[in-house]
Amino acid sequence: GAGVSQTPSNKVTEKGKYVELRCDPISGHTALYWYRQSLGQGPEFLIYFQGTGAADDSGLPNDRFFAVRPEGSVSTLKIQRTERGDSAVYLCASSLGGGYENIQYFGAGTRLSVL
Amino acid sequence: GDSVTQMEGPVTLSEEAFLTINCTYTATGYPSLFWYVQYPGEGLQLLLKATKADDKGSNKGFEATYRKETTSFHLEKGSVQVSDSAVYFCALTLNNAGNMLTFGGGTRLMVKP
């Protein structure tokens, strides 16, 4: 079956612009996660959705970052007034539920470059 | 806070050599532990996991044992192949609601024929 799909795979933007990154999880997965991976580092948690609601957004670095999941499936990560420090690979993962026994399946990521 | 520390790479080995990648953790509770692998051009994939002390996770010839006394989860393989070349990430989750993963910095493994 289809895995987690992220689009676009690459995004180049200019400082100050607005960007949207899309994640299409595995069908039937209620939990969805966003992580950010800077060059040479491990992924860092940003936000977790259970269904349509953001159950934990404690990893969002500031109020320029926002994410939605209006129908409990596709999610969009939105970044306003982008800065060069936002350049990273943004990873999405989904799992059947939010419990520790549920494996998270990752997409290939969106590489964001802010010039 | 909770954290994962793993040995820095790159680790360069010849085919059929023995592999160890060290991983230690700090956690406030009793975490579940994972190894994820990222092959070139691909997304993160779960390699193995262990959910309680003394559990051994294994997959594709890789093994790791959850050592509570040393807060470690070292990854081992007896005989590596060129196809094992990838970046390996150790991670934990605190088994609470949400199950967010905390990752180490990753270790790049390069296996030469």
Image (cartoon, rainbow, N blue to C red):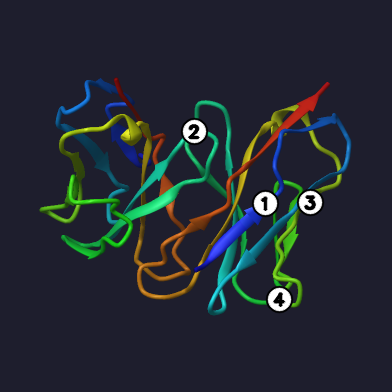
Residue A39 is labelled as 2
**Which chain is home to disc 4?**
B
> Where is residue A3 shown, x and y percent of the image?
38, 41
Q: Quadrant of residue B39?
A: top right
Crowd around label 4: few <14 · some 14–19 · many ≥20 (10 Å)? some
Picture disc at residue B68? 4
Q: Residue at x 47, y 74 (%)?
A: B95
Image mark for residue B76: 3
Dot in front, 4 or 1: 1
If you read the primary sequence from the N terminus, does the residue marked by circle 1 or circle 3 appear first? 1
Residue at numbered disc 1:
B6
Disc 4 secondary structure class: loop
Q: Residue at x 26, y 42 (%)?
A: A24
Nearer the observer, disc 3 or disc 2? 2
Q: Chain of mark 1?
A: B
Judging from the image, what secondary structure is the residue with disc 3 in?
strand
Contact between marks 4 and 2 (CB within 8 A): the answer is: no
